[in-house]
Amino acid sequence: MSRRFAAVDLGASSGRVMLADLSDGLELTEVRRFPNEPVTVAGRLQWDITRLYSEILAGLRDAGPVSSVGVDSWAVDYGLLDASSSLMGDPVHYRDDRTRGVAERVAESVGAETLYDVSGLQVLPFNTIYQLLADRLDGAVTMLLIPDLIGYWLTGEVGAEVTNASTTGLLDVRTRSWAFPLIERLGLPAGLFPPLRQPGEAVGELRGRAADAVGWSAPVTAVGSHDTASAVAAVPASGPAFAYISCGTWSLAGVELPQPVLTPESRAANFTNEAGIDGTVRYLRNVMGLWLLQECLRAWPGSDLRELLSAAAGERPFAAVVNPDEPVFLPPGDMPARIAAECRRTGQEPPSSPAAYVRCVLESLALGHRLAVRQAMELSGRDVEVVHLVGGGSRNELLCQFTADACGLPVVAGPAEATALGNVLVQARSAGLVSDLAEMRSLVAASQPLRRYEPSGDPQVWEKAAARLA
Ligand code: LFR
């Protein structure tokens, strides 16, 4: 058996097929990277899923034969299959506004406490539960979350991988099975929800037209198919006293726990208990993340991120800060204009140049990281000595340093490709090459470049800035 594994990793702004070789340590190479550009069709923001699928096939073909393939993506979104197992339409993007008001209605009818007690999930307007209630489900026979849909097209096998299923709001946080009493109470058809599978289990064999297009076949293995679950699995921590920030389009900031935290305080702070691999709980909150920066860059065509970041380092500290999690920042659109409006609303002068906007975004995000890490520690009682910042954001030196300063804790940055690493390591474990989560993490620590940032400067200035957002 070869020691090569392929990871299909779909992010909200780009997808990639990565190849890992575990013959001698752990070597990861990028085989193919492709943009993920949502399309608005008849006023609805959608994922171009067939385009993504053809990129995946091309990437797998380029990767050459492997021992196994794993697929992960962003969470909550899904495709619906009809009675002939055809996709009923492109999956709708979680940033589409069709769920407006749905979460409030469900909280009124079922009770916010009940929902949290069943699923342990933070309320985000786009959770699958609210999307399903906003959709027309007539004719729908099966709901497949994005990685499960890709897995179905590759193998013909239907199922729901549990880490991603935990982001639907319809999985029982205690039993990790579908919450059928809640599903029925909401009037959702129970048959929509396919059997659950665990990370590490077989999905099926790459076959039919998919195998023809790829030119070889291999087993597809279920991984932590929620990208954040894979990223957390690859955090290069050596003991339990760590927090993590999986920083890309979103910053997912929290701690790893053996048990969920379902207290009223945890619900009030909108902390989530998502399923991690091996029964762990990803106790975290979504912070708006680099989306703020990505959308600024989209508004400034021709701008150069490297130049902006080095100019931002010289801008005046804390000239303006915003709460990164304001719901106005969620949809796509003119981000600088929304940041300016938010500054005015909170009595601050808006930034006056792109570099000043970038400074504002990075300081605001670091404040978001600080709050989420501190609350995760307080609400869970977990001691934290170090913050692991993984994902694409780990390449952003200014953000890493601000995060260390804001949290008052050392930040270990990297790996940038934590998600793909977590994906392949779960496959490698199923192949018997790695023993457990601890060994997976030490393999990452030993093989990937990491950089440590010590907290610097006067902690008071972050304290004061945080107070401005309170
Ligand atoms: C990160 C992520 C988050 C989820 C968001 C939407 O890529 O998966 O964990 O809340 O995207 O699906």
Image (tube, rainbow, N blue to C red):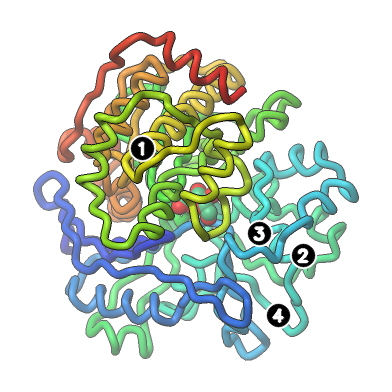
Q: Position of residue 369 (x, y in %)?
A: 46, 30
Which percent across, then down, holds residue 30?
A: 19, 61
Could you tell me if the residues under marks 3 and 2 are in contact, i.e. CB atoms within 8 Å?
Answer: no
Q: Residue at x 20, y 33 (%)?
A: 450
Identify the residue at horizontal 50%, vertical 14% (top origin).
464
Q: Secondary structure at mark 3?
A: helix
Callout 1: SS: helix
* Vertical placement of residue 144 versus 362, above or below: below
Point out which mark residue 128 bears. 3
Residue 140 - label: 4
Amino acid type at circle 3 is Thr
Density class for disc 2 (Cα within 10 Å; few <14, some 14-19, many ≥20) is: some
At label 3, counting other C-alpha atoms closer than 10 Å, the crowd grade (few under 14, some 14-19, many 20 or more) is many
Q: Is residue 350 left or right of residue 102?
A: left
Give the Cα distance between marks 4 and 3: 15 Å
**Among the two numbered marks 2 and 1 on one chain, the one whose residue lies closer to the N terminus:** 2
Contact between labelled residues 3 and 4, with CB atoms less than 8 Å apart: no
Left or right, 433 with reference to 24: right
- Type of amino acid at the residue the image marks with label 4: Ala
For the question of whether residue 448 can be seen, the reply is: yes
Decide which of 157, 234 is in the foreground and name it. Answer: 234
Image mark for residue 133: 2
